[in-house]
Amino acid sequence: MTSSNLRRNLWWISVAALVCTVTTPAGARQGGKSPSPPKNDPNRQEWVQLFNGRDLDGWTPKFAKHDLGENFNNTFRVENGLLEVRYDKWTRFDGEFGHMFYKDPFSYYRLAAEYRFVGEQVPGGPAWAIRNNGLMLHCQKPSTMLKDQDFPISIEVQLLGGLGNGRPRTTANLCTPGSNVVMNGQLHTPHCTNSTSMTYDGDQWVRVEVEVHGDERVRHIIDGRTVLEYTKPQIGGGNVSPVDPAVKVDGTPMTSGYIAIQAETGAAILHERPM
């Protein structure tokens, strides 16, 4: 192994790690045991730890061109108490966009995490995916994704890092694979919409939170400041392929869904900071 190849592999070693927590009003969580507080108290909230710090229990990977549950190239893994997405076992990317889904769907919640980008992109990754990852919200059920499907129908909270070239590159942007939203009272159909955040160059940690109220309102929050807000997420538009037409019924309100973490060739590390 040459010194340049060794350096490349070392850069790929630590590509992404995430520990998430979600807070839900009592009775709002779906698909799991109801919280202990009374269901008629909408103001009572609890933190639900999605990652146990030991293994991938409760999470299911899905990579394009691969079957549900196959952890292609051992991309998602747990080391040192962190949930990591790593590309050290990849030689080249060929469209195998990956997502890992939490077992339960949610409707009303706050998702909190911190992230940073490190290292280099895996060879073959598209230019737009450099220092680019995301949290996918209101996702379709992973078992309804086609084998070759690139992205789940969802709302993406796009996590970006600055490119170090002096040009602005916001984070906590909105992308809409198979979905649309409403902004300023109008149906908003562009695939990606920038937030008002600052640019975060280098390997610094960035705190991101998302406040989700079913299909009523979604807010993207960076370091305690709301940087993007929209309403009425709904199935529609393109940018997801191929897709089962029986699942992608345009105009359907996205009132709840699964949470997923992307593996999108970008090098990132994320961990939880619930409070």
Image (cartoon, rainbow, N blue to C red):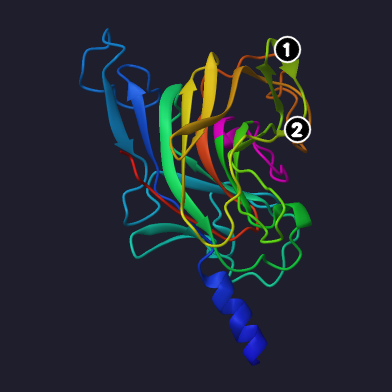
Of 123 and 268, the residue lying toward us: 268
Q: Which residue is drawn at 68% across and 24% down?
A: 247
- Closer to the eye: label 1 or 2: 1
- Tag 2 or tag 1, which sits nearer the N-term? 1
Q: Tell me the SS state at disc 1.
A: strand
Say if residue 1 shows up in the picture: no
The secondary structure making up most of the magenta span is loop
Query: Percent position (x, y) of residue 159?
Result: 58, 46
Whether the magenta-drawn stretch holds residue 63 is answered as no
Q: Is residue 247 above or below residue 162?
A: above
Label 1 is placed on what type of residue?
Answer: Gln
Of 47 and 67, the residue lying toward us: 47
Q: In which quarter of the image is residue 121?
A: bottom right
Q: Residue at x 46, y 54 (%)?
A: 205
Label 2 is placed on what type of residue?
Answer: His
Name the image quarter holding the C terminus: top left
The residue range painted magenta reads 137-153
Left or right, 154 with respect to 214, comes to right
Tell me the crowding category of disc 1: few under 14, some 14 to 19, or many 20 or more residues within 10 angstroms, Cα based.
Answer: few
Q: Residue at x 65, y 52 (%)?
A: 66
Whether the magenta-drawn stretch holds residue 140 is answered as yes
Direction bottom: furthest residue? 2
Residue ID for mark 1 = 186
Residue ID for mark 2 = 191
